[in-house]
Image (spheres, rainbow, N blue to C red):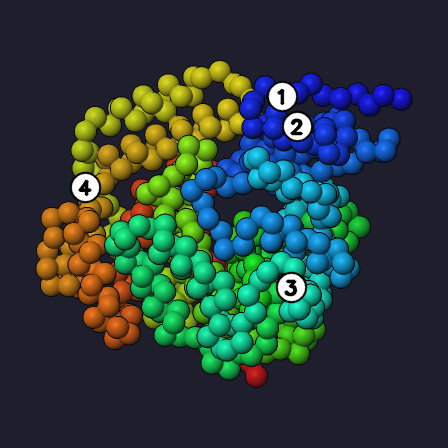
Amino acid sequence: MVPQTVPPPTDATDRKVYDWLSANIGPVTAFERQPRWRPGWNVVAERDGAPVPLYVRGPRGDTYISPVDMYQEAEIHHVFERTGIPAPRVHGMIPDPLCIVMDMLPGRINSGTIADPQLRAQVRESFIGIVADVHRLPPEAFAAARLPVPRTPREIALNLYAPSQAIFRDRIGGRAWPLMEFAWAWLNRHIPQDRTRVTFVNYDGGQFLFDDSGAVTGLIDFEVSSLGDPAAGLAGMRLRDSTEPLGDLTQMIARYEELSGDVISRALIEFHTAGFCAVNGFLMWPLMFDSAPEQDYVAYLNYSVGTSRWMIRAMADYMGITLVDPPEPVERPLGFSQASRHLVRHLGGFADGTAAQDYARDSAAHLAYYMGRVNDFGLSVLDADLADVARLTGTRHDDWHSAQQALSAWIINAGGQAEAQLLQHFHNWLQRQAFLLRGSGPAAFLPTVDLQPIRVRAG
């Protein structure tokens, strides 16, 4: 029986993916592009007369650089296939656009949606057990993925953070960005010196699929990985928990300790929470100055502000410092406020198109809305930011660029003596940025939520 194929898509990028699948897997019988900030496709192709459900994982855009490239990511999938860790099988790589073609695993994501508390607990117990299994794999199992092997406590702590900072330093192009300069200095000053265990770490942990029986069908998404301290993977679950609840993370860490024999302190979790949040900042803040047309600018800005806010909070919690929220900005319009509202309305009137076209239209409307808030509140935010810099450095600057350069120099001279002051300073700045982003797209909630606290446990 001849399979009932779907017609080739009209979008140029979609067509490249469709054509590769047709030539390398088989006739395409279902093809759907996901409407999201990163391109991806849900596909069914026929191979040897049987349907093969596939997920095609697309690129983030030409200006985004990752410390783990997509070929390394695919190799991590191969390692898991060889070692019995449940994860999608990779069928191949599409060279243009660069994509990973993998199995579409059965099941769904987000264990917080499970109504039955016993089943929910079972799924989460299974998940942390698989994480412990992954951490038992020897580092040499990942040799084909070309992941650097750390040796010293410093290398173990910074094995993902250091290459991410190097990407930031190159991509920021000499621009003063004291927030991330401070972050890198802070991480180096607070390296855990007693950690010698090295495992594979998926820093963006907590991503897995499960079925209705409570079985975990596979781990997913390994693009932010390295060999390093397994505690970093547990810390990263706090970020995933903000959108896909994982339950009581303090209890989950305790269960991991039982399974692994490791001892994970609250301070260690706070250090690596700050570290992984810093990775997000290192990789995404440069996009705010040099973005590619296909990138969702306002979504990335929400991610940048949100994760940087969590980073500063984790540093403060590590040090036992209480941060105080600044006053909210006041409205002082720079120009005609109606301009942004008119543009949002205008974009909303555009006819529906493909999934990619609809997403681009909505993204543009969210960006227009954000620009309207910048118009209305930006002067108030700028004045408060310049005043904060002046309080630290002793010099008042008239523009943001000069103030950032002065603050960068001041941070270098202050060393570790001004950490408490700088944590409060950057908290102020990020709270104001979060205020500007209110209502600016589906990701606008991220800069407003806090990560689940990790409790100090007895003993």
Instruction: Name the residue that disc number 4 marks.
Output: 379
Give the spatial CA distance, label 1 vs label 2: 8 Å
Give the spatial CA distance, label 1 vs label 3: 39 Å
Left or right, 88 with respect to 151, comes to: right
Q: Secondary structure at mark 4?
A: helix
| Res. 31 image quadrant | top right
Give the spatial CA distance, label 2 vs label 3: 32 Å
Percent position (x, y) of residue 37?
A: 50, 37
Q: Is residue 337 above or below residue 425?
A: above
In the rendered image, is residue 20 in sight? yes
Q: Residue furthest right?
A: 1
Q: Front-most of 317 and 43?
A: 43
Percent position (x, y) of residue 91?
A: 72, 43
Mark 3: amino acid:
Ala
Residue pictured at 40% horizontal, 28% vertical:
365
Instruction: Name the residue that disc number 1 marks.
Output: 9
Q: Secondary structure at mark 3?
A: helix
Q: Secondary structure at mark 1?
A: loop
Q: Front-most of 43 and 263?
A: 43
Q: Earlier in the sequence, mark 4 or mark 3?
A: 3
Q: Residues within 10 Å of mark 4 (few under 14, many from 20)?
A: some
Disc number lying in front (2 or 3):
3
Q: Earlier in the sequence, mark 1 or mark 2?
A: 1
